[in-house]
Amino acid sequence: MLNDTNFRQYCQSSTWYRPGLKVLVACSGGVDSTVLLHLLKSLPQIQISMVHFDHRLRGIDSDADRAFVEDMALRLGYPVHVISEDIGDYASQNGLSIEEAGSIRRRSQFLALKDQLGLHFVATGQNEDDQIETIFMNLYQGSGISGLMGISEYTNSFIRPILKYSRLEIMEYAENHKLQFRIDKSNSDTSFLRNNIRANFIPGLTQNNDHELKACIQSINQAAQALSDMIKTSIEDIDIKEFNTYSASKIALGMGEVPGYFSPIQKAIFDRAFQLISSRPQGISSSHFKALKSLLGDEAIGKEIHLPAAVTACRHRAGISLYKKSDYCWSRTQLSVSDVGKFPFFSIEYSSSNLEDHIQDPSYFWNVYPLEAYRLRVVEPGDSLVIDATGRSIAINQVLQSARVATYLKEYYPVLEHEGEIQWVPGIRTAFPALVSEKIPQEKELRHCMRVQFQEGTFE
């Protein structure tokens, strides 16, 4: 039974509770968040702030929701923050459903506001019925083991204090305390998957065995959490390697034993890699999983799969890499010693070094002209490099191919040119006219140079 006393005892026994707790409560104006606010008032030594997210989807109804929440905050004496975004526009631009787009943006904005205000947690009003609906949604969409966990009661940033209570208990609490709340008419629109499951699927299951279903869901949730924790620990130690650089990151999956794993374990690996690179809590759909499995064979080398959140999966010789192409774009051209020299997957250091120590090392380029006379740019179609005294040249793409530059990085690879002639393919080869002869350095001689260092995994 949901009442102030039981709720207070439950919260005070929870690992997330502490004296002086500072919480940002997400309030839509609906019954769940309204009851949550009313219940949290009963907790001693708690500081409450409110946040309302306006999705700009329901016209005057959205305006009325916002006004209701602002009035409630005024009556309760809590500060309220209103965030307004066009979720329909965000969904269309990113190829997402309205539900998914709203979830992503709410989570991102709530976390940012929590950190900005210096609060401990974001509190949201999901209930036991939401948990059941979420698990069935995940099953329908093929989200695998991670989807069976449903909604977590407590994470590092979110708490869901009424997750153990049913929608019926919450409604009864609202009626007993004569609480006013808003009703979102879109919740009856069965074109949304969650609403369809709520209206047409769950009632048939719960008609005569509601208690058994909830007990079963709880058992599945606990088992999935334990299994997921075991898998996560294993795959991050063995199968997943994360590369972070100055402005980009990628997730590398070595082939190893992955092709022979049980299908749900494969999906867990892809889910975790996608979560790490996309910063989204959810994994991939069953259709995207099927597409990713097509990359496991050697015949798929060079093939790409496009995933949500602008993530690309590319199969190369060593395995599969997940990355965002936008992270690898760069436009730096003219060089300057005042520049930091850090690029998405490599860095350039400008210094002086002993010439004879690195004379044949392609990671070094020895300046003949002032640094500003050189231009560093992305490789372009038709680029070539002079390789001998006769003026014979070779295509840069062939140079990159021979050096086994990762397929997905070839279009972003740097070249150094002077007056339109390529002098250096960093880390691979220096043009013949720019080479320093081994006969020149007779003694220890310091010369100005550039040195390149690449992200691990640039070369396969």
Image (spheres, rainbow, N blue to C red):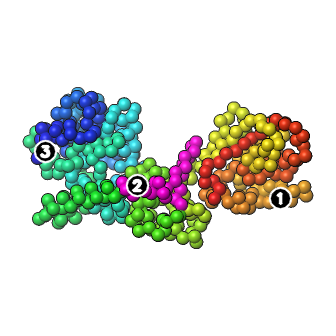
Q: What residue lies at 58% left-to-right and 72% top-to-bottom? A: 299
CA separation, marks 3 and 1?
79 Å
Badge 2: few (under 14), some or many (20 or more) residues near its Cα, within 10 Å?
some
Q: Which residue is mark 1?
A: 393
Q: Which picture quadrant has residue 271?
A: bottom left
Residue 440 location (% of width, % of height): 90, 43
**Residue type, numbered disc 2:** Lys
Left or right: where 454 falls relative to 239: right
| Figure quadrant of the C terminus | bottom right
CA separation, marks 2 and 3?
35 Å
Q: What residue lies at 23% left-to-right and 43% top-to-bottom? A: 161
Q: What residue lies at 39% left-to-right and 51% top-to-bottom? A: 281
Q: What residue lies at 72% left-to-right and 44% top-to-bottom? A: 376
Q: Which residue is mark 3?
A: 2
- Is residue 88 in view? no
Does 291 lie within the magenta span? no
**Residue type, numbered disc 1:** Ser
Quick one: SS at disc 3? loop
- The boundaries of the magenta stretch are 229-254
Badge 1: few (under 14), some or many (20 or more) residues near its Cα, within 10 Å?
some
